[in-house]
Amino acid sequence: MQTRNSYKAGLAAELLSALWLTLKGYRILGWRFKTSVGEIDIIAKRGKVLAFVEVKSRPSLEEGFTAISPENASRVRRAAEWWMKSNPGIADKCDIRFDAVALANYSRIKHLPNAF
């Protein structure tokens, strides 16, 4: 049961983060992009910036950002390489960035560009 609740909480956090990024002027190109090498929570574009976004929901914003381990960041980077090879028309024209969004109790949210 806890796994199911965690899954639902993760979906809610990603949905809120996608909405937040949309309100900041980003266009969501992908959500929950999964490959054999990793997963990207959100793929978003604003202007010439293409952002691969990791979302973490924790009791505090600080805990959310520190929850992104080097291994987690590496998996996101590998999945991003996969996505960019599959979408060269978009990726070739953009500056690539790896961002993070942290949520604290679904009431506070912070977007950190170039997080890793």
Image (tube, rainbow, N blue to C red):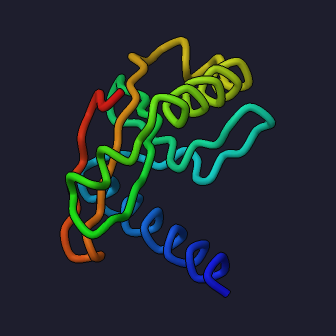
- Return the x and y of residue 52 as percentages of the image width and height: 47, 35
Q: Quadrant of residue 90?
A: top right
Q: Quadrant of the N terminus?
A: bottom right
Q: Is residue 100 above or below residue 11?
A: above
Left or right: 84 as drawn, with respect to 24:
right
Write the residue at 27% across / 69% down.
Answer: 59
Q: Is residue 58 above or below residue 87?
A: below
Q: Quadrant of the C terminus?
A: top left
Write the residue at 34% across / 43% down.
Answer: 100
Residue closest to the far bottom:
1
- Return the x and y of residue 110 as percentages of the image width and height: 21, 54
Write the residue at 72% across / 45% down.
Answer: 34
- Return the x and y of residue 28 as percentages of the image width and height: 47, 49
Q: Quadrant of residue 81?
A: top right
- Return the x and y of residue 51 as percentages of the image width and height: 41, 33
- How many discs appear? 0
Write the residue at 19% across / 68% down.
Answer: 108
Residue closest to the far right:
36
